[in-house]
Image (cartoon, rainbow, N blue to C red):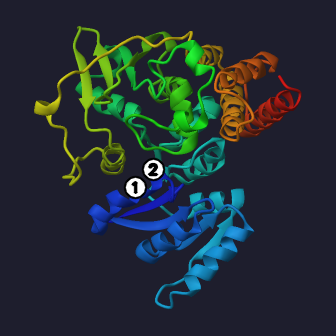
Amino acid sequence: MTVKLSILGSTGVIGTKTLEVVRNTPSEYEVTALAAGRNVEELAKQIREFCPVFVSVQDEESRSRLLALLKESNDISVPDIGIGDSGLLTVADVPADVMVTGIVGAKGLLPTWQAILRGTTIALANKETLVSAGELIMPLAVDKGVPIIPVDSEHSALHQSLRAGSASEVHRYVLTASGGPFRTWSRTQLENATVEQALKHPNWTMGKKITVDSATMMNKGLEVIEAHHLFQVSYDRIEVVVHPQSVIHSMVDFVDGSVVAQLATPDMRLPIQYALTFPKRIQAPWPRLSLQELQTLTFEPPDFERFPSLKLAYEAGKMGGYAPCVLNAANEVAVGEFLEGRITFLELAILVERVLEAHQPGRPSSLEDVLAMDKWARQTARTMIRKGG
């Protein structure tokens, strides 16, 4: 039976890797809807190859450019084209068996919520959705009987390792972290870290926002919060260990002392394929892990002093309520400002901490509450930057 598939963020890393998986077994999938940003050249190629019935782009200018590109090809059917947030919601409404949420940031929240309401299985690569609104998203998914299957390599590894036992048999969940490009840098060196240096990840090819988050270790902090919601586990049972080789993607430590880990080459196509074919596994053509070529696997504790963003994420997660939403929103603003050269690398965590301190603690009772707090946190972060901290 053909699986109907929609993708949020089709021209990004997760989206293009997902389409590579589809391309490997095209008879298994029908791509029904795609959402992209402004990369309409890549989106036009995807439309020609996969023939979705609906696509969405970021704005009207992108829509006009996409239409012009598509009209150059007389042999394809031009899909309906939406724009902005309404376009994302329409993508979530197009009938699909699985929606891959490869979009970056809190903008993935509303379409994910909409897809769950429709009963669409979520292949989750947009960690910000659970970070911002996990207390609402997970109960909704349970109520609707909608599976949320993780695509992040770390959470996929935990998901796979958990097949060796039940959740009640787990002692701790161990998330591995590469340490990013600044793993060995001193605090003094980090004071002068540039955007170009932050974007040079040693192991993974990712978008700019996630790569900067990896450099600050905020990405791992967001993954801790995501793991808390996905696996319904307390924060004191989620441990982060730095593993520079990125071969062990995460581990589950069971109560009897057995540690089950998932190992693979650092290639996002594997966890994407696993999410799309779960509970089955199928043959894949991409490079396999060679145990003979592995010389060293090393592990070290994270340094919360040099990388305070990870500590902030743990604190926000334990606080719960609005705090993770504020953490995520402030961080998105901070990363954008860093990429534009308006704040320094070390000021990323400082800004997030100050917005967290300024927020009014509480618990959201609706998605509107989350969106309102997200908006407040972004405005507060921008105000602090304009006022020079």
**Res. 145 mark:** none
Front residue (pair 262, 32): 262
Q: Is residue 353 visible?
A: yes
Residue 66 image position (x, y, % from top left) = 61, 75
Quarter of the rendering occupied by the N terminus: bottom left
Q: Is residue 28 visible?
A: no
Give the image quarter of residue 274.
top left
Residue beneath label 2, please? 14
Q: Going 49% across and 11% down the picture, which residue do you hit?
A: 303
Q: Residue furthest bottom?
A: 74
Residue beneath label 1, please? 18
Horizontal relation, residue 379 to residue 6: left or right: right
Q: CA distance from mark 1 to mark 2?
A: 6 Å
**Mark 1 vs 2: CB contact within 8 A:** yes
Front residue (pair 53, 35): 35
Residue 63 vertical position relative to residue 84 in the rendered view, above or below = below
Front residue (pair 288, 29): 288
Label 1: element kind: helix
Give the image quarter of residue 382.
top right
Residue 121 image position (x, y, % from top left) = 46, 49
Horizontal relation, residue 130 to residue 14: left or right: right
Q: Residue furthest right?
A: 387
Q: Going 32% across and 64% down the picture, which residue do you hit?
A: 23
Q: How many numbered marks are there? A: 2
Label 2: element kind: helix
Front residue (pair 4, 175): 175
